[in-house]
Structure formats: structure tokens, C-alpha cells
Amino acid sequence: MFYALITTTFWGVWGAFIEIPEKAGFPATLGYAVWALTMIPCALVALKVIGWKLEYSPRAVLLGSLVGLSGAGGQLILFQALVEGPAYIVFPLISLYPVVTIFLSILFLQERTTRRHWIGIGLALIAIFFLSYQEPSGGNFRGYGWLALAVLVFLLWGVQAYVMKFSNELMKAESIFFYMMLTGVLLIPVALWMTDFSKEINWGLKGPWLAALVHLLNSIGALMLVYALRYGKAIIVTPMAGLAPVITVILSLILYAVIPGTFLTVGLVLAFIAIFLLSD
């Protein structure tokens, strides 16, 4: 629970500040490249903890890379889904990825928990949906290719958390994170290819440098998630981490004087109840 709460907090703070470099003219695709690079120092610290004893058996490489590819690959696919489709549908849909993790963990890992926790899990999933809701905005969206992409991200991220838990039974968490970092870095060329360099890009302090500071929070949170899944049940850790928008909303309220609407208010109330039930 300690590691899960760190992940939730760091990802929540990350969510509150991530739009600053993007609005300053540093595109999200380049932000991905910066994020992948911030994974490197976190991976090095993790390896130092275990005396640089990286596991490199075929099984370790395969499982670690699968965790990394499903997470980082899902992020790149999400960029395209948001280009083609409406955010107010895409974000709530993919936010429910813990459903996939919970289903797989119950089916294959035989995870079980108390009735109190099940109520908390249910409320957390509902809260995540409300917290991820986006107000409809204008846009000319054609076809349903973006919906297929959003569903793919939903599945990839759900599978990622499950494989992360499964892998923790067979290898060290630090090795898992190293391969997550490696696959993320290897996908940087794809992010560069997706970037429109014809537009003006902010290369100043509010561009890549601020993005690096903000994305470092995400990377640390990701490392803590691996540790959380080492010790905790995926059916509890995953929905807990998904409540990061609670921190984002609270910080946005304080920093940007953003008044939460009905959806956010309902999400916040449900989230606080879910955290109380899950943290016992």
C-alpha cells in the first residue's frame, strides 16, 4: 500500500503539471521521448539497489520487455487515438483498464480479497471513470478507427499491470523496470516520427527541461508501481494507482483555481471512499 500510494501521489502531481510544457509549445510526442530518458536514472538506481545483478535470461528479457512494450506502446497509440478521436470518449474508456488487470488476476493468479475491498475496488473504478471524463469539444471526427485504437490502449495497459504482477513472481522488480526503460527508449524513434517538426517547438526551459522534471515524477511512480505489485495484489494496487487524478484535481483547484464540475465532484467523493476501503 505504501508503494501504491507513492505511485498515486507522484502520478497525480505529474498530471497537474504535464500540460504546462505542452501548452508552452513542446509537443506530447517529444514529451514521450523525454519521459523515456527520465526512466534511465530510475533504472540505474534500481539496479544499484540489487548490486547491479541484472537478470538476462530469455524469460526475464521477454517478460520485462512485454511489460515495457505494452505500456510505452500503448502511450504512443494513445497519441494517435487523440488525434483522430474525441478526448471525452477516449480518456474515460482507457481509464478503466484496471478491469482487464482485475479479470486476468482473478482468472490466472487466483487473487482474492475481502468484501470490503471489493466494494472499494468497484467504487474506485467508477471514480476513475468520473475523474477521467472530459467535456465534449468541437471536432470533425471521421470513422471509428480511433475507437479501435482506444480499446487497444485499454487492453495493453490492463495486460501490462497483470504481466508486471506475474513477472514479479519469477524475477526481480528491478530487472522488470530496467527492461521497461529499455523498451521505452527503443520506441523514441517512433515518437520522433509522429512529431510534426514543421510547427514551432519550444526548446527553452518550459520545453524539454520542464518536461524532464515533470516526467521524472511519472518515472519514479512507475518504479514504485513495480514494487507495489511485488508485494501487493494486482486487484487492489491497480485501481489504487488509477486514482491519481484525485491528486491532479486537488492541485489544479489550488494552483489554477479550477472549480470541479459535477463529474469531478462525484469522482472525488467516490475516490476518497474507495481509498478508505482499500487502505484497510
Image: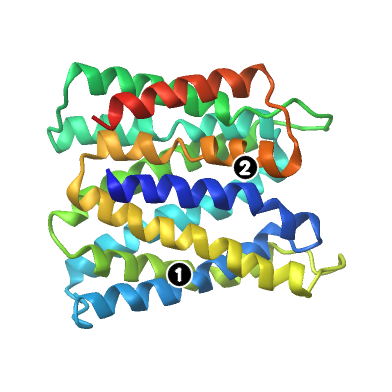
Q: Nearer the viewer, residue 20 or 171?
A: 20
Judging by the rendered image, the residue that carries numbered circle 1 is 39
Q: Residues within 10 Å of mark 2 (few under 14, many from 20)?
A: some
Image-based side of 158 in relation to 75, left or right: left
SS state under label 1: helix
Type of amino acid under label 2? Leu
Quick check: marks 1 and 2 in contact, CB under 8 Å?
no
Judging by the rendered image, the residue that carries numbered circle 2 is 251
Q: Residue at (36%, 73%) from the top-left corner?
A: 43
- The image quadrant that residue 234 belongs to is top left
- In the rendered image, which quarter contains the N terminus? top left
Image-based side of 133 in relation to 114, left or right: right
Where residue 259 appears, as percent x and y from the top left, is 72, 28
* Colour scheme in use: rainbow
Q: Residue at (33%, 69%) from the top-left corner?
A: 179
Where residue 139 appears, as percent x and y from the top left, is 83, 32
Type of amino acid under label 1? Met
Is residue 193 visible to us here? yes
Q: Nearer the viewer, residue 167 or 18?
A: 18
Q: Residues within 10 Å of mark 1 (few under 14, many from 20)?
A: many
Is residue 77 visible to us here? no
Q: Nearer the viewer, residue 260 or 23?
A: 260
Q: Residue at (43%, 53%) from the top-left corner?
A: 71
